[in-house]
Amino acid sequence: MRRYGKHTDEDDIRSRPNRKGNRPRTNIRPKHEDAAEGMVLTVDRGRLTCLVEDRAVLAMKARELGRKAAVVGDRVALVGDLSGKKDTLARIVRIEDRSSVLRRTADDDDPYERVVVANADQLAIVTALADPEPRPRLIDRCLVAAYDGGLEPLLVLTKSDLAPPDKMLELYGDLDIPYVVTSREELADGGAADRVRAHLAGKITAFVGHSGVGKTTLVNALVPQERRRLTGHVNAVTGRGRHTTTSALALPLAGADGWVVDTPGVRSFGLAHVDPSRVIHAFPDLEPGTEGCPRACSHDEPDCALDAWVAEGHADPARLYSLRRLLATRERKEGD
């Protein structure tokens, strides 16, 4: 049955009134010009603990950010309750541009990349000289991720009382990576922490390493437990303090201006996200020599111009060997 005749106009059509009286939605979002600046300290199940001035504020991501996620180290803008009191919650309305990003994938075939930390200046790669045995391939992969993400690497060799560091220092000496060698006694009495702290002052440093290398002991020495508890996340449901090694945590460096980012222990460091062509940027002495390379050169083929560049004395042959070793790491597993 027809409700209207053949020749109806707009006046004949009845419209249902908006009972709620809401205004129509708009794509124009507030600019939040009065938002406070903060830094993400840790992320736990959708809740982010942020440092706002001198207090820890629990926050959640605003819906307007969509799928964009904030990670430890991100500089963010927050609105809402910024008191930091129990049972309060602020909103993160903006994530600022990042100066560096440390990423990893589960393995080299995993297309899903995980951002470990943002805006870090340095990556401290902690490895034991023995018990457990050092894994150079894992170290190489961490180096590639650091160079690709814009971080400067720092090599921390622990347990020198069990094995000498000479072999490892020879292996990485040509890369000109700063390093610190420590022993178990020095980790216990604080001497190792003082030497490591000298490399961390004024910087945001992410620590990575696999289980048993002494990373947690070192981080605890750099960040007193009292401050660690104060900075730790407080569960919004139970009200109990909670720090888990399954997520990264940024901690203020004791006795110096700087931050330590404690990350979970890693068993592997996938590099599926790394474009091998970007690794050359970490070798400024070799990069000019690539101008004569054929298109899409892998820098490890007969026509690579870097061989002639090194033969002419522009760079040390050991540096070219180091570059090719890191590029080959992209195609190898850690245990190879």
Image (cartoon, rainbow, N blue to C red):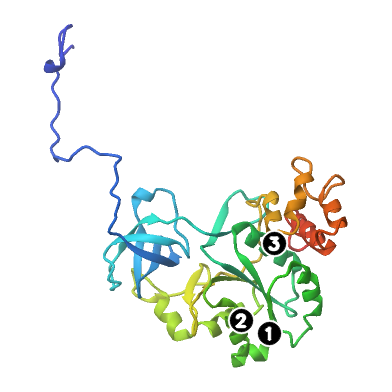
Q: Quadrant of residue 94?
A: bottom left
Position of residue 208 measured from the top left corner of the image (x, y, whole percent)? 61, 70
Amino acid identity at mark 2? Val
Q: Quadrant of residue 284?
A: bottom right
The foreground one among 215 and 52 is 52
Q: Which mark is residue 99?
A: none
Mark nearer the viewer, 1 or 2: 2
**Mark 1: few, some, or many residues within 10 Å (few <14, many ≥20)?**
many
Q: Which residue is mark 2?
A: 196
Q: Which residue is mark 3?
A: 141
Kindly state the secondary structure of the residue where label 3 is placed: helix
The foreground one among 265 and 184 is 184
Position of residue 253 measured from the top left corner of the image (x, y, whole percent)? 50, 79
Q: Are marks 1 and 2 in contact (CB under 8 Å)?
A: yes
Amino acid identity at mark 1? Thr
Q: Residue at x 48, y 78 (%)?
A: 257
Position of residue 290 measured from the top left corner of the image (x, y, whole percent)? 76, 49
The foreground one among 285 and 221 is 285
Residue 105 shows in the view: no
In the drawing, does residue 314 fall left or right of residue 266?
Answer: right
Question: How many angstroms separate mark 1 from mark 3 (CA)?
Answer: 22 Å
Amino acid identity at mark 3? Arg
User: Where 257 falls versus 290 (above or below)?
Assistant: below
Mark nearer the viewer, 2 or 3: 2
**Mark 3: few, some, or many residues within 10 Å (few <14, many ≥20)?**
many
Residue 41 shows in the view: yes
Q: Which residue is mark 1?
A: 182
Q: Are marks 1 and 3 in contact (CB under 8 Å)?
A: no
